[in-house]
Image: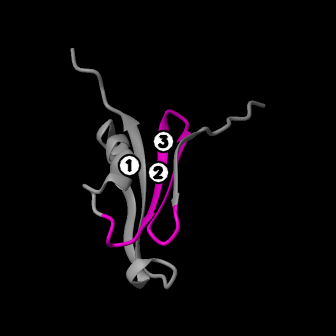
Amino acid sequence: MTKECSETVLSIFRPGLLFVEAVTAGEGIVLWVYRSPVVRDTDPVYRPVRDLLGAHSVSTLVSETVEDSRMLFGKAVRSCHLLARMAETA
């Protein structure tokens, strides 16, 4: 029996602002993002996430806004993405 281990690809912990965890899963990566609505795709704190998303083919599994008093403005956007390597072009 072979046991597969996941490896952390990206981890960001900014309380009240942004939580990110990306781990390997088989041939791809599972990316969990939990961010305050004040965090924009263009913000420097989000750049590692943006770069990871840009380097892969992305399937968004879930994306929703939830109430969370611990986050800035009392809300958070939580999402989960499955990332696959983009096919090489010849």
What residue would you read off at disc 2?
31
Position of 87 with respect to 62 (left or right) is left
Instruction: Using the image, tell me which numbered label, if any, was put on residue 39.
Output: none
User: What amino acid does circle 2 point to?
Assistant: Leu
Q: How is the image coloured?
A: one colour
Residue 35, position as x, y percentages in the image: 41, 67
Q: Secondary structure at mark 3?
A: strand
Magenta residue check for 16: yes
**The N terminus - image quarter:** top right
Q: Which residue does the image show at 41% across and 53% down from the upper left? A: 81
User: What amino acid does circle 3 point to?
Assistant: Ile
What residue would you read off at disc 3?
29
Labelled pair 1, 3 in contact (Cβ < 8 Å): no
What residue would you read off at disc 1?
49
Q: Which residues are magenta?
A: 14-39
Q: Is residue 53 above or below residue 46?
A: above
Q: Is residue 47 above or below residue 76?
A: above
Q: Is residue 29 above or below residue 68?
A: above
Taking the view exactly as shown, the residue that stands out farthest to the top is 90
Taking the view exactly as shown, the residue that stands out farthest to the right is 1
Taking the view exactly as shown, the residue that stands out farthest to the front is 44
